[in-house]
Amino acid sequence: MSAAPLVGYSSSGSEDEDEAEAEARAQARPGAGGCRRAQSPLPSQRLPVPDSVLHMFLDTKEEPEDDREKHGGRVRTFPHERGNWATHVYVPYETREEFLGLLDVLLPHAQTYVPRLVQMEAFHLSLSQSVVLRHHWILPFVQALKDRVASFQRFFFTANRVKIYTNQEKTRTFVGLEVTSGHAQFLDLVSEVDRVMEEFDLTTFYQDPSFHVSLAWCVGDARLQLEGRCLRELQNIVDEFEDPEMVLRAHAEQVRCKSGNKFFSMPLK
């Protein structure tokens, strides 16, 4: 079974509130508008800058350090740049005790094949790829999303087919549960999200998406170890779990947008 591409999660997403504050302060400075006091002319000659000062900062880099150890060894999908906010649209997956009980069985078994697998911190189903938004476009983008999904009804879905995924760069591998009922409703949501992406000249979602809940991930391409025998065994664990249809049945109640460290929720009707 070939691995389907997953939304490219990214740790980038710089905060840039200071730009607006700096601009406001600049406009509020005394003398920024109206009449200015007469100023005495500046001297026509300037003192030369010493060579020691000119060469002081030649080796200084303005780019922030990208320390992989701070985010589990993950590689950025796109370079960090001040003012760029990594943005992702998704449906949150609310876990229950029975779901976590199943995960407590699945993950240790998968780790016998790939010990570096770790459990996801939160669970969701992606409706977009990870895209870059400038700070001043975040609120208009979120408002456009709200307008698009405002008329959508809540719906139930089931994700109970184990599948192995990678991101597009093949730098991360995920063990997930693919949606087997509710696919049409997710397609409708993606269609509206894609319209918003097009309005902002951003990348739309995959042509033939595999909606899923990622359970665990690891750095690198681990498909060779996880597909085949391991995948079959994981699926058997799901199928033999007590009442898996009910355990893995969930309710889509909202669409959520994460931009940098900000979260925006859009309830469905």
Image (tube, rainbow, N blue to C red):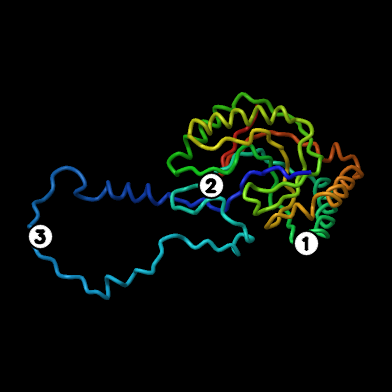
The residue nearer to you, when weighing 20 against 206, is: 206
Q: Are marks 2 and 1 in contact (CB under 8 Å)?
A: no
The residue nearer to you, when weighing 29 against 64, is: 64
Q: Are marks 3 and 2 in contact (CB under 8 Å)?
A: no
Q: On the image, numbered disc 2 is attached to which residue?
A: 86
- Left or right of 113? Residue 119 is left
- Can you give x and y, in whole percent of width and height, for residue 246 in the image? 85, 37
- Left or right of 262? Residue 117 is right
Element marked by disc 3:
loop
The residue lying at 77 percent from left, 53 percent from top is 224
Q: Which mark is residue 115?
A: 1
Q: Earlier in the sequence, mark 3 or mark 1?
A: 3
- Can you give x and y, in whole percent of width and height, for residue 153 in the image? 68, 25
The residue lying at 83 percent from left, 46 percent from top is 98
Q: On the image, numbered disc 3 is attached to which residue?
A: 42
The residue lying at 67 percent from left, 44 percent from top is 6
Element marked by disc 2:
strand
Marks 3 and 2, how far apart at CA: 46 Å
- Left or right of 83? Residue 101 is right
| Mark 2 residue type | Ala
User: Which of the two marks, 3 or 1, is nearer to us in this view?
Assistant: 1
Element marked by disc 1:
loop
